[in-house]
Each structure stands twice: as C-alpha cells, then as structure tokens.
Image (cartoon, grey):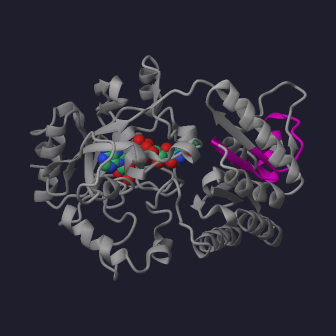
Amino acid sequence: MSIVDDLRQIVDVDRVSNNPTALESVSIDESSLPPVQPEALVQTQTADEIQSVVSYCYEHALPVTVRGAGSDLEGSAIPIKGGIVLDVSRMDKIIQLWPEDLQVKLEPGVVYDKLNDYLKRESLFFPPSPGGSSDVATIGGMVSTNASGIYSVKYGGTKDFVLELEIVDGTGTRYKIGNRAVKRSSGYNLIDLIAGSEGTLAVITSVTLQLLGIPEGNRKIAFKFKSEYEAAQTVSVLMRYGLDLAAVEFLDRSVIEALNLLNNYGLEETPCLFLEIHGPQPVLDATAETAAGVAAEMGGEPLTLASGQNPWEIRHHATNAIKLRRPGYSIIRNDVAFPISNLPEMVQYCRQLAEESGLLIHAFGHVGMGLLHALILARKEDVDEWKKGLEINRKIIRKAIDCGGTISGEHGIGLGHKAMFGLEHSGSVDLMRQIKKVFDPRGILNPGKIFDLSARE
Ligand SMILES: Cc1cc2nc3c(=O)[nH]c(=O)nc-3n(C[C@H](O)[C@H](O)[C@H](O)COP(=O)(O)OP(=O)(O)OC[C@H]3O[C@@H](n4cnc5c(N)ncnc54)[C@H](O)[C@@H]3O)c2cc1C
C-alpha cells in the first residue's frame, strides 16, 4: 500500500491527496524560496485525526510539515524534506468564549481577522495583528511563529496571550500545556517553548488565548523629520517619557519615495514616525500633545496631507509599494530587532550600505520595540547584484546581533535565516537540539528548519 492509501484509512479519502495541483499549492509559502512538493497533502478536521496521522508518520519516519495559511515569509511552511503536509486550516472553530474572563479557546485554523470580527460583539480583541497577512494568518501559525505587529509595542506578541495549548508531539502523544490562570509560577514554561518553534516540536491542536477589552478611543498621528537619524533618535526619547503608545512606526525616505511612486500621494520625501494612541479622550489628547512636543524638540513637524488623506492608511501600503517599485527586482528581507537606543545607528548603517552599494534599501518597522525591516531590492538574474544584496542583508543582521539583538523579531527563522542562526545562538543550539529530541525523537516535525539536527549536517 502507498502512503496515500494508508492515510486514507485514517482520514476521509477526499482529504488525502497526491494530486499534482494540490501538492504544488502547498510546495511554497510567501517567501521567495524555491518550491518543494510533499508526497501527500492531508487535511485534518480533528485533534484525533492529527494524533493518528502523526503516529503513522512517527512509525514510518515520514516528515510532517504543518500548514496554516502558508503566509510564512521565511520558508518555514515549505516541506523541504518531502513527506506530508498536514493542513489544519479547516480546523477553524471557536471552541469556547469566556467573556467575563476575557478568554477564548479555538482550533488552530481560525484566521486572525475572523477571530477579531467574532470578538467585537463582546468588545474584546486579540491585539498582535500580523500586519498585511491578518486576513489569512491562522492562530496556530501565529503561535508557531510568535507573530507580532504594530500594536505589540503596547500589548506584546502572540506568545504573551497564550494561556493553554493542546499539542501532539512527534511521537503522536497528546498533551495539554498551561491552564487558564493568568498568573502562574508553576513549573517549566512549555508554552514559551512551543511558541516560535515553527512546527518543529509539536502540532498545535487548540489554543486558549487571553484577550483584551477594545480601547475606548484611538488617535493616529504622524511626524516628518529632516533625517533618518533625527527620527530614530526621537523614538527612545518618546518611550522614556512613559507615554502609553500603542504603535510607533518608522519609515525612511526610500519607503516614502516608494509610496509616492505607487500612488502619487505627494508625500514630502523625508523620514517619518507614525504613532497610535489608545485610551479615553483625555488620555488621547494629553498623549498626543506631549508626543508632538517631544517630536518638535527633536526636529520633527506634524505630517499632514493637503489632500486630506490619512497618512496611516498610506502607511498600510508600504510593503506593497516596495515590492512594486522596480519591476524585475526581488526583495531580500530581514526583520531584525535590538535595544531601541541602537535605532539611530542601525538606520544610519542601512543608509550607508545603500549609498556604498547603489542598491535600494527601504528601512521601516515597529521601532517602538526596536524592530526594523530593511528591504533590499536586487535582481536575481544579475548574479553579482544578488550576491551583493545578500551580503548587505548579512551585514545588517550581524550589526543587529552585535547591538545585542536578534536575527528575527517577527517572522521566525525557517530556512531564510537558518544559515545565520548560529551567530545569535552559538552557545545554545546544542541545547535546542536536545529539546527537539525530547519532543520529536525521530526528527519528523518540520525537518530542516531553524537549525540542523546534527552540527555536521
Ligand atoms: C504580506 C505579509 C505581511 C506579514 N506581516 C507580518 C507581521 O506584521 N508580523 C508577523 O509576525 N508576521 C507577518 N507575516 C508573516 C506570517 O503572516 C506570519 O508568520 C503568520 O503568523 C503565519 O501564519 P500562517 O497561518 O500563514 O502559518 P504558516 O505560514 O502556514 O506556517 C508558519 C509556521 O508555523 C507552523 N505551523 C502552522 N500551523 C501550525 C500548527 N497548528 N501547529 C504547529 N505548527 C504550525 C508551520 O509549520 C510553519 O513553520 C506577514 C506575511 C505576509 C505575506
């Protein structure tokens, strides 16, 4: 019997496929890394099915790559070692809501925006929006990558909201980890181990989240600066004022140029900071006034658009504007994070690298928590140019690490950042390998991602 025949004994026939079109559709994610097809696609509907499928794969040493929406940007959802893709996107039910406790339990395939639409009726929300992918990203995928977004400055990333997980490890054994207590000092924090593990330790079959009440009001303001350095310096000062800012976004002049090219917004081509404040009216007024005072002292001016357009709505198109800026060019991306005092040096470094190399580098990000994206445009067909782009990317990542930071503050490691993972974790990769063995002794869960199982691989 073939793998497909075997799996059809476990899951309905029409939810196990080796049809070339189906296999092709799960051979990629949103990274630009090359596709790899699995041997079979299995769409599960229950935790029992997941357990049986993983047990089968454990017995046959068959790789399992779990897939939510496949919106990963670092190749983590690509089944590079073949085996099966375990698609959990059909598991999209809200299992239970406890409005008085501000908590919800759900299946892993629930999509972020759909969850927040559902929660609105109780004036609740789950804050860490994964930006431009919020309409597709699943909660299971968000936990697995510890996704975060513009509001993570105030509220934190996905893992900060996870109370309880139900998981199936690499042997097919089920566990419930955590509980619904908001404050715990009880044993090892296994939730933090699973959050950000990119499907390499376990398959998440349910998630219980802590939620927040929707704030009474919000205010969006924006400032322009003469230089990237000034804008970046302002961030640490703003944060030290103790202002309760929900979002602090930076866009360098290259990003503004790209936005103007996309849609002729007529924005002055100068670096900007975008802030969002959440709270009751008096808090909004007072915080906005203090923030404007700080920005002015640091050389900033309010950014207003003659057309009456909202600068924040324009900011939403930043990634797309960069993507479409030069036809035939591809993006080399990073999502470094570091202590915020290093921001001026980091943005200056990006500008310096752009000037030296002649390549376009667009720096922007959730800088209130020291997260910066530097998107480099280069042509894959031009071997030297592509190499140069990759080298610049490495330099930016190395600089972030040297500043006490991380390779990835947002998107995870997957395949895209794997080669540099040891730079950040040289002393502890071996410890991670040992942990991986405990959860997944045969190494079947998302093999080849984050780090290799043996230092010699
Ligand atoms: C336009 C765009 C904008 C984005 N913006 C952001 C952003 O602002 N912030 C951010 O953090 N990310 C962002 N991302 C990246 C991506 O959307 C997030 O990483 C998201 O959390 C992935 O969710 P997913 O359902 O698509 O997961 P997938 O891509 O399907 O999977 C991601 C990883 O999680 C694992 N996984 C998925 N489900 C499970 C499960 N149930 N159990 C165990 N492992 C699982 C997979 O094996 C894989 O390793 C963006 C992506 C795009 C395309």
Of the 4 image quadrants, the one containing the C terminus is bottom left
* Residue 110 location, quadrant: top left
Of the pair 240 and 220, the residue shown nearer to us: 240
Of the pair 367 and 30, the residue shown nearer to us: 367
* Residue 87 location, quadrant: top left
Taking 173 as reference, is 427 left or right? right
Residue at 42% in and 51% down: 145
Q: Is residue 303 above or below residue 368?
A: above
Whether 257 is among the magenta residues is: yes
Q: Position of residue 396 (x, y in %)?
A: 65, 69
Q: Which residues are magenta?
A: 244-273
Outermost residue on the top side: it is: 121
Q: Position of residue 342 (x, y in %)?
A: 68, 67
Q: Position of residue 88 (x, y in %)?
A: 30, 38
Residue at 61% in and 30% down: 279
- Total number of numbered labels? 0
Q: Is residue 6 above or below residue 219?
A: below
Q: Is residue 431 visible?
A: yes
Whether 363 is among the magenta residues is: no
Taking 77 as reference, is 390 left or right? right
